[in-house]
Amino acid sequence: VIPPPVIHIESYSEDSISFTLKMNTNIKVSGYVVNIYWTFDTHRQEKRTLIIEGGKSLQKVANLTAHTPYEISVWARTELGDSPLSFARVVTGGTRPASPSLKAKAINQTAVECTWTGPRNVVYGIFYATSFLELYRSPHNTTTTSHNITVIVNRDEQYLFLV
């Protein structure tokens, strides 16, 4: 039986998490698959996947959001197959940034200008869809460091926007 890997949170800050991975077995590990999940504004679950080759164990994940709960799931790839999943949860330090204030204005039948307020020198994600279900499951999206963007949409549709 292949045991699940052990995740140990070494440290965390406002924008990063450091953790080690190890296997309590003599089975040779060829690598790990790490998924980091977080929920964006209660509407959209985001995920970042890391593929770690070999038995290298110390990892640092940066560019995270302050005071946000993250869930880390890991499985090991071994010479005998994949291990079961392990989970760890951590909340980054600091104060969560205020939600931006979004305004969306139709320029014409296929273009919408989105503008918002918020801090400078950060990356914003713009999500849009024709229903709340689509906005939650599979929205169109783009990113920018600006405070405005023009989004091309289909004509004769109503859209929901989230930044």
Image (cartoon, rainbow, N blue to C red):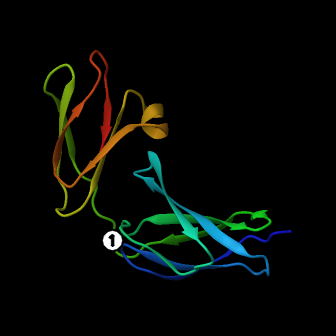
Q: Is residue 81 left or right of residue 73?
A: right
Location of the N terminus by quadrant is: bottom right
How crowded is the residue under tag 1: few (<14 C-alpha within 10 Å), some, or many (20+)?
Answer: few
Query: Which residue lies most toward the top here?
Result: 156
Where in the figure is residue 150, as x and y percent of width and height? 18, 36
Pick whichever, 58 or 87, lies toward us: 58
Pick whichever, 139 or 33, lies toward us: 33
Can you say whether 127 is above or below 39 in the image? above
Residue located at (46% from left, 37% from top): 138
Question: In the rendered image, which residue does mark 1 sit on?
Answer: 95
Pick whichever, 13 or 80, lies toward us: 80
Query: Which residue lies most toward the bottom here?
Result: 10
Q: Is residue 4 left or right of residue 95?
A: right
Where in the figure is residue 18, as x and y percent of width and height? 48, 79
Secondary-structure class at tag 1? loop
Can you say whether 140 is above or below 93 in the image? above
Query: Which residue lies most toward the right here?
Result: 1
Residue located at (35% from left, 67% from top): 63
Where in the figure is residue 129, as x and y percent of width and height? 37, 32
Q: How many marks?
A: 1
Q: Quadrant of residue 159?
A: top left
Q: Is residue 128 left or right of residue 46?
A: left
Q: Is residue 82 left or right of residue 97?
A: right
Pick whichever, 31 or 40, lies toward us: 31
Residue type indicated by callout 1: Thr
Residue located at (16% from left, 52% from top): 146
Can you say whether 116 is above or below 120 in the image? above
Residue located at (45% from left, 32% from top): 134
Where in the figure is residue 106, as x and y percent of width and height? 17, 27
